[in-house]
Image (cartoon, grey):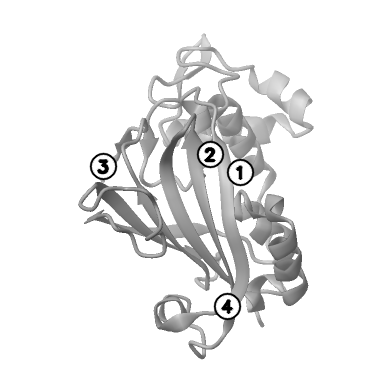
Amino acid sequence: MDDTRVSKPASRTSQLADRVLEAIRSGEYQSGDQLPTEHALAERYGVSRASARAALGMLADRGFVYRLHGHGTFVSRRSARVHTLNEAVSFGTMLAAQGLEYEVRVHDAAVVRAGLEVASALDLESPDAPVLRFRKSFLVGSEAYMHNVNSVPLAVIGADAAERACEDHSVLDPLDSLIDSNSAAPTAYVLSTLEPVSAPLGDYEELPVDDGTPFIKVTEVGWTEKDRPIWYSIEFHSASPLVMQVMRVKY
């Protein structure tokens, strides 16, 4: 059965864990703050106390919170300020967690042929397969911290959604919202490749950046729960206020 037609909804536990983490990322809960009790979370979000307990356990396992027996659950020091490479959160979410006000600028959006690189990454039948391609930049003040080029097959989101996106660029950020609103199979995980590059940048040759200026190029592919690639992105990161860390778990 085609996995674009079947959706497995996230459990109440994982949904609650995501909402609590979002509250941490947005600054509602700061490092060291005590989180509401399991009972309070259950009432606030309309879930069982068992689901609330399990959600806090998920966050504790991922290192975002810690528990003190007899005292409660607290936000860990690294939660809001350090972003691990094994967490697929949006760039806007990471900027907001740093207390930075940012602007997303969509430069253009069009339906084009995939091309060899995108078709290969997304297992498309032909380089001529149509994709929605759009370019964005994330700016803090007047400084751009990241530029990216996204490609989403029309087979994933549909021709009508792609046409609307070309006319209304506001639906293009964040990318997950575009996918979740128009596809039955959301992104489950992202595989990324990081490499150093220098200007001029492919797909952004017109940027007023001196030749040789260093960037980090991040190539990403979003995958569904059933291991189907559904979007392709190239990001160029300049000097960034974000701190990235790799968490190595001992087994």
Q: Where is residue 102 in the image (x, y as percent from the top left)?
A: 54, 33
Q: Position of residue 19 (x, y in %)?
A: 64, 34
Considering only order in the chain, which callout, 1 or 4, is on the residue closer to the N terminus?
Answer: 1
Is residue 106 toward the left or the right of residue 200 in the image? right
Considering only order in the chain, which callout, 4 or 3, is on the residue closer to the N terminus?
Answer: 4
Q: Marks 1/2: CA distance?
A: 21 Å
Tell me which corner region of the image, top left, top right, bottom left or bottom right, holds residue 113.
bottom right
As shown in the figure, which amino acid type bears the numbered disc 1? Ser
Specify the label residue 248 is tagged with: 3
Q: Which residue is identified by label 1?
A: 14
As shown in the figure, which amino acid type bears the numbered disc 4? Val
Considering only order in the chain, which callout, 3 or 2, is on the residue closer to the N terminus?
Answer: 2
Single out the mark in the foreground, 2 or 4. 4
Is residue 210 toward the left or the right of residue 52 in the image? left
Single out the mark in the foreground, 4 or 1. 4
Q: Which residue is identified by label 4?
A: 112
Considering only order in the chain, which callout, 3 or 1, is on the residue closer to the N terminus?
Answer: 1
Is residue 192 toward the left or the right of residue 167 in the image? left
Considering only order in the chain, which callout, 2 or 1, is on the residue closer to the N terminus?
Answer: 1
- Residue 130 or residue 21, whichever sits in front: 130
Secondary structure found at label 2? helix
Secondary structure found at label 4? strand
Q: Which residue is identified by label 2?
A: 92
